Image (cartoon, rainbow, N blue to C red):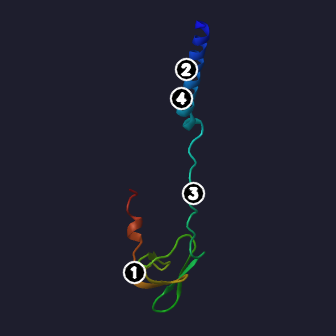
């Protein structure tokens, strides 16, 4: 009789320890589901064409970044332009000033 009670208690504590252990270890072996990552935003256009506002001359084709109002560019002729308007994939830039890039070439690297 005493032996059977002892086995009942051992069985009871074994089951209780198993249940507690299950709830304590469950998060480590079965992590919470993670939300699906949001897709990367797509560029509205594959390329942008930047025109001179005054003459309509094409200054540059841009394929790697989105062009926004306020962006600056320096042409091959060392002329600095500022984008003043963007309509679909066409940007219009206003001449700002003539740049002397040689003064930047003489400076040591920082």
Element type at mark 4: helix
Q: Position of residue 10 (x, y in %)?
A: 58, 16
Q: Label 1, label 4: how many angstroms apart (C-alpha)? A: 76 Å
Q: Where is 97 relative to 25, above or below?
A: below
Q: Mark 3 sits on what residue?
A: 37
Q: Residue at x 56, y 72 (%)?
A: 43
Q: Quadrant of residue 12?
A: top right
Q: Quadrant of the C terminus?
A: bottom left
Q: Earlier in the sequence, mark 2 or mark 3?
A: 2
Q: Earlier in the sequence, mark 4 or mark 3?
A: 4
Q: Please say if the residues under marks 4 and 3 sit with CB atoms less than 8 Å apart.
A: no
Q: Where is 54 relative to 83, above or below?
A: below
Element type at mark 1: strand
Q: Label 3, label 1: how many angstroms apart (C-alpha)? A: 46 Å
Residues 84 and 24: in front is 24
Element type at mark 3: loop
Q: Earlier in the sequence, mark 1 or mark 2?
A: 2
Q: Position of residue 48 (x, y in %)?
A: 55, 79
Q: Where is 57 relative to 65, above or below?
A: below
Q: Residue at x 41, y 77 (%)?
A: 70
Q: Earlier in the sequence, mark 3 or mark 1?
A: 3
Q: Residue at x 57, y 29 (%)?
A: 19
Of badges 1 and 2, the one in the foreground is 2
Q: Mark 1 sits on what residue?
A: 98
Residue 13 - label: 2
Q: Mark 4 sits on what residue?
A: 20
Say few, some or many: other residues with alpha carbon within 10 Å of mark 1 (under 14 / 14 to 19 / 20 or more): few
Residues 45 and 110: in front is 45
Q: Label 2, label 3: how many angstroms apart (C-alpha)? A: 44 Å
């Amino acid at each position: 009789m005493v032996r059977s009670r002892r086995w009942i208690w051992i069985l009871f504590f074994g089951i209780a320890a198993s249940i507690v252990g299950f709830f304590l270890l469950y998060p480590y072996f079965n992590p919470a589901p993670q939300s699906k990552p949001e897709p990367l935003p797509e560029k509205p256009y594959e390329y942008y064409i930047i025109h001179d506002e005054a003459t309509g001359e094409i200054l540059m084709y841009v394929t790697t970044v989105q062009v926004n109002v306020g962006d600056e560019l320096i042409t091959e002729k060392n002329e600095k332009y500022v984008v003043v308007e963007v309509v679909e994939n066409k940007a219009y830039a206003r001449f700002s000033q003539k740049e002397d890039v040689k003064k930047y070439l003489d400076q040591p690297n920082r």
